[in-house]
Image (tube, rainbow, N blue to C red):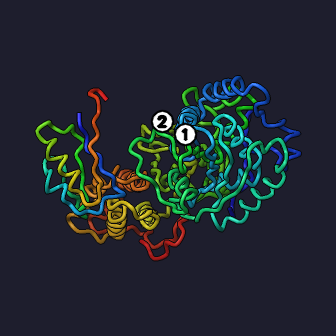
Amino acid sequence: MPNASDALPVTGRYRLLGHPTDLVGHVAALGHVPLPSADRGEWRRAFVGALEASGLTGRGGAGFPAAIKLAVAHAGGPGGPILVNAMEGEPASDKDALLLIRSPHLVLDGAQLLAAATGAGRVMVCVPVGRHRVAGAVARALDERVATPCARVPEVMVRPPDRFIAGEESALARWVESGQSLPSFRPDKGTALRIGRRGALVHNAETLAHVALIARTGPDAFRSHGLVEDPGTSLVTISGAVEHPGVVEIDRGTPLIDIADRAVPTGPPQALLVGGYGGAWVGPAHFTTPYASLSLRAIGATAGVGIVIVLGQTACGLTESARVAHYLAGQSAGQCGPCVYGLPAVADDLTRLARGLTDPGLRTRLDRRLGAIDGRGACRHPDGAVNLVRSALHVFAADVGAHLEGRPCPHWNQPSQLRIPDVARAA
Amino acid sequence: MIRILLNPVACDAYGYCAELLPEAISLDEWGYPMVDGRPLPPELVGAAKRAARDCPRRAITLQVRKSGQ
């Protein structure tokens, strides 16, 4: 997490960031986590009611309503674990790391609340191997909580491999069960995840912090931010061609360009990459689109994991997209044919296009391949890659036209403005 | 109504299904089956059952759905 700047507080009563880091300060500022005392049934009704009324949606990518996920997990039966998903596999995301370093107890409180509501037997915080700062912060927080009322059910940290796909929720549950970070084929995603014979509930770290705050402040404080149909705040990591990359907390519904401006772009952005590497490019025509699920969906984008990357004028959007496509191809779990063979093929097509090394069939071939991959994996990994490439072809349509006529982008050999691990040979 | 459900993790591109049920299953350029999303006409149910049974990877199941779902 090298370049997360100080997060600017949002205005209003509700905020995720800015609370004390240590347990004593945390309890002094926010009070004890409101776990059930005598009447668990009564407590559960009130807790579930507050969660429903808040309208909180998952902040890990899918944006699924937290109250429905809780109901599904509850139906799956008690005794399983709550998995705190701090895998943050998106290379351009720092928000969960920042949150766990700054406010680990908020995240852990949220997990304890959901454990109480579902009858879960333990909390497992999943931090990838190698993320030393986050792991250190979590270890300190867990130590502080041992034998306090905060740790109603046992809390442990586990260390899955640091891979893009390892944080996909079924892959995470599978890793806990069998040590393999592989997504499961789940035709009906409305059923509870299972580890062994017990139900498991997986939540993004940020979502859990919201749960912990909503349980304390009630749903209205949460709803005093954002939109009626998409309430609350969100953490967004901003990077790319900006002066001050880092994590900010924004109200849902904030225009995309206002989010980018918080990090001070180095010049007028050429485009914004919204939602991460499985997200979508957004061109200037849609810079004022509100950061909210429905508005983003309407322009083919997604809030995804809160990521906004600013593409400067001196970059080739197609070359950058080809680099991302190569990266995503390399991060396939390797289980499904369309992902294993399709993503490298699409990445190669895009690289040829960006360099002006085109052939007459390239554009139709690329479109056909994108159509052939979409929706055919066990998980959404290939779909995200397809969405990114399609958005690139749309937003950078003028460049596509020029490259198809054999004129490569003058910026194709510029260093990437994106954070992409191990992509030196690609594109 | 019967729907063909293909498990992409199990599938290893043997391609038998596309031979047995070309009306509903085609192969992509890498040899993996693509199921068209349309409801399976009654006259193809027998062939679909055979495709499911003969898949060496047991990657195909037939899902019976109530109409309207």
| Amino acid type indicated by mark 2 | Ser
The N terminus of chain A is located in which quarter? bottom right
Which sits in the foreground, A324 or A26? A26
Q: Chain of mark 1?
A: A
- The correct choice, above or below, for A265 with respect to A423 in the image is above
Q: Position of residue A279 (x, y in %)?
A: 47, 51
Which sits in the foreground, A164 or A46? A46
**Can you identify the residue that label 2 sits on?**
A295
> Share a chain, discs 1 and 2?
yes
Which sits in the foreground, A14 or A96? A96
The C terminus of chain A is located in which quarter? bottom left
**Can you identify the residue that label 1 sits on?**
A291
Q: What residue is at 29 percent from the left and 59 percent from the top? A: B57
The answer to whether residue A266 of the structure is visible from this angle is no
Helix, strand or loop at label 1? It is loop
| Amino acid type indicated by mark 1 | Tyr
Q: Quadrant of residue A17?
A: top right
Position of A113 compared to A166: left or right? right
- The correct choice, above or below, for A363 with respect to A120 in the image is below
Q: Position of residue A118 (x, y in %)?
A: 63, 36
Other residues around mark 1 within 10 Å, as few (<14) / some (14–19) / many (≥20): many
Q: Chain of mark 2?
A: A
The answer to whether mark 1 and mark 2 are in CB contact below 8 A is yes
Q: Position of residue A217 (x, y in %)?
A: 75, 29
How many numbered circles does the render carry? Answer: 2
In 3D space, how far apart are the residues under numbered discs 1 and 2 (Cα atoms)?
7 Å
Position of A308 compared to A31: left or right? left
The answer to whether residue A386 of the structure is visible from this angle is yes
Q: What residue is at 53 percent from the left and 66 percent from the top? A: A420
Other residues around mark 2 within 10 Å, as few (<14) / some (14–19) / many (≥20): some
